[in-house]
Structure formats: structure tokens, C-alpha cells
Image: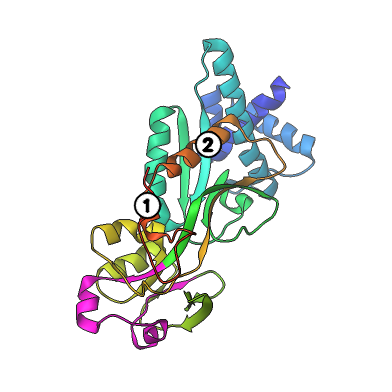
Amino acid sequence: MVDRLQDMRLFRLVVQTGSLSTAGRQMGLSPAAMSGRLKAMEDFYGLRLLKRNTRSLSPTAEGQLLFENAQKILEEVDALDSIIKNGQSDLLGTIGLTCPTDLGRQWISQLVDSFISENPHIRVRLFLTDRVLDFVESGSDIAIRFGDLPDSTLIARSLGVDRHIVCCSPQYLEQRGAPLSPEDLQHHNCLVHLSADFTLDRWKFMDKGVPTTIQVKGNRLANDGFTLRQWGVQGLGIIWKSVWEVADDIQAKRLIPLLEDYQCPSTGFHLLTEGGKKLPLRVKTFVDFAVQYFKKLDTPSRYILPPEAPLGTMRPGPRG
């Protein structure tokens, strides 16, 4: 078992440095010894682990799989060694986290800061994207997402409730006036989000319990939520965004809510982990920390319609 762990450390270092000779120097092994160890590993697995030419070295698909899993295994081993040797239980290792761009910049980056301040030996790899990535593709342990759960095999922890809200800047409102009904949006410049598969130009509302969908259009489309929000703040059009992503702008009066008599649909707001396997302690600790962290946040709650409120109203939610 020790030899297998040593091989993992060797292979991890080779991939990280991109050089057999550099990795060998760091491990105190000659180029011949490194080549011999790598050949023994490839013989063991019965396939190539590295692609090599005169100028570069990179893992094959199987080598990348070995590298990613070796990272996780070695971090767990190092954490266990530290606990046993030092008599302490500090969390160690890397947590991979992916979330929507705007949410990440406004909220998740602060969550990460708070978590690391309490767990200084943890490293967080935060990947911001508005695409829905699977865990293998993004190399993540955790995904934070709005909306319906995409995969029943994922384990979900609720972080709260989300809904969309229509808003624009005071400048746009002064120049173009406010839409009085969802249908009026067809005469306004609406800033549209592009998803990986389709254009999100069909905005949904509830009017006295009756759902309605309005197809909007405008002169700016983007696949990045942060860019859409910035355009909205600059007075370039109307946006349809998650309350979590515009709550601070509304509070600061950079954006003004519109169509408040029309309720936009509410959705879930979840933290997701892969099912079917035990979570490393550092990941489980982060999950529990995140759930408690978002329970304490009340800024977006004032823009989410409480379940007992009648349609056509919006009032502050409970604080604390």
C-alpha cells in the first residue's frame, strides 16, 4: 500500500510540474529511476498514463482520472497523518466548488472567506460559471445552483428560496418609463440571458394565480449573469434576475423593482453533492457551514414573497 501511495505522489508531481526530470529532482530520483517508476505504473494498469513529445508532457484520459483521484486520496492521507502525529483535527485539503457567476462574486466568495478564516488549512477552488456542469467535468465536490434539481442521484441541501425579479436602473426608468404589465415589456429593451442550450427570453409571471409567459427582446444578450446585471445598472435595459443576484443593487437603489403586482415563480436554491459516496470531512464541514451561513443572511429575503402573502404584494420577510 505504501508503494501505491508513493506512486500516486510521484505521478501527481509529474503532472503538476509537467516534467519527469523536474519531478525527479524534487523527489531525489534520477531520470532513469523516474522513467522506471512510470513504466512500472503503466505496466500495472496496462495502459499509457502520459502523452510525451519533445516539448511537453500531459496525462492521457486515464492518467487525468488517476491524477484527480490521487489528489483526493493523498489529501485524505495527509490529513489523517496530521491528526495522528500532531494530536489535532484541523481540516486539510482542497474543496472544489462551482456556482453561478453573479452569485459567486456577491455571496459565495464571502462564504469562502468566512470558512477559510475558521479553517486556515483548507484550500477552496471556486469555479464561477452560469453553465450547469457535472461534477466530473468541473472537478468539483460541491455545486450551488438555482432551480429544479437536474439529477436525482445528487444530494441536495436547501439554502433558501429564490425567485426572479424584473428591475432596471433609475436612469432607464426616467428615460423610458415603467412597464405597467408584463405585456408592456415587449415595448422595452430587455437584456437577455443566453444559456448553453437556448435563449432565456421567455419571462414568466403570475397574475392573480394565472401564469403568463412573455417573450422579450433587446439589443444585448450575454451568457454571463454579472455582465447582464452591470448593463442593467448602467441603464441599458431591463433585466430579469434572481433576487440573490440583485438584492444589494436594489437596496443601494442602483436598480428599481418593476411589475411588483405580478409575482414571478419561486424556485429552490440548493447546495448539491454527489450521492452514493461518503463525503470527506472537509466537504461535509463546508456543507454544514454554508447552510448555517445562508440562514443568517436576510438581505434577499425582503424581495421574496412569503407563502402566506396574497399575490400582487411584496413585503419584507422576517429578519434574523
Quarter the C terminus occupies: top left
Q: Position of residue 174 (x, y in %)?
A: 19, 78
Residue most toward the bottom? Answer: 187
Q: Residue at x 53, y 39 (%)?
A: 287
Bounds of the magenta segment? 165-194
Q: Is residue 182 magenta?
A: yes
Mark 2 Cα within 10 Å, few/some/many (few <14, many 20+)? few
Q: Earlier along the polypeptide chain: callout 1 or callout 2?
A: 1
Of residues 50 and 31, the one nearer the viewer is 50
Q: Is residue 279 left or right of residue 128?
A: right
Query: What residue is pinned by disc 2?
Result: 288
Q: Is residue 231 positioned above or below 90 on the image? A: below
The image shows a total of numbered marks equal to: 2
Residue 129 in view? no
Q: Residue at x 51, y 70 (%)?
A: 195
Q: Is residue 231 magenta?
A: no
Q: Residue at x 33, y 75 (%)?
A: 238
Residue 71 in view? yes
Mark 1 Cα within 10 Å, few/some/many (few <14, many 20+)? some
- Based on the displayed image, in which of its 4 quarters is residue 15 positioned? top right
Q: Is residue 243 positioned above or below 109 on the image? A: below
Q: Is residue 280 left or right of residue 176?
A: right
**Residue type, mark 2 in image:** Asp
**Residue type, mark 1 in image:** Arg
Query: What residue is pinned by disc 1?
Result: 105
Q: Which mark is residue 155?
A: none
Do tag 1 and tag 2 residues touch (Cβ < 8 Å)?
A: no
Q: Which secondary structure, mark 2? A: helix
Q: CA distance from mark 1 to mark 2?
A: 21 Å
Q: Position of residue 84 (x, y in %)?
A: 58, 13
Of residues 268 and 23, the one nearer the viewer is 268
Of residues 83 and 268, the one nearer the viewer is 268
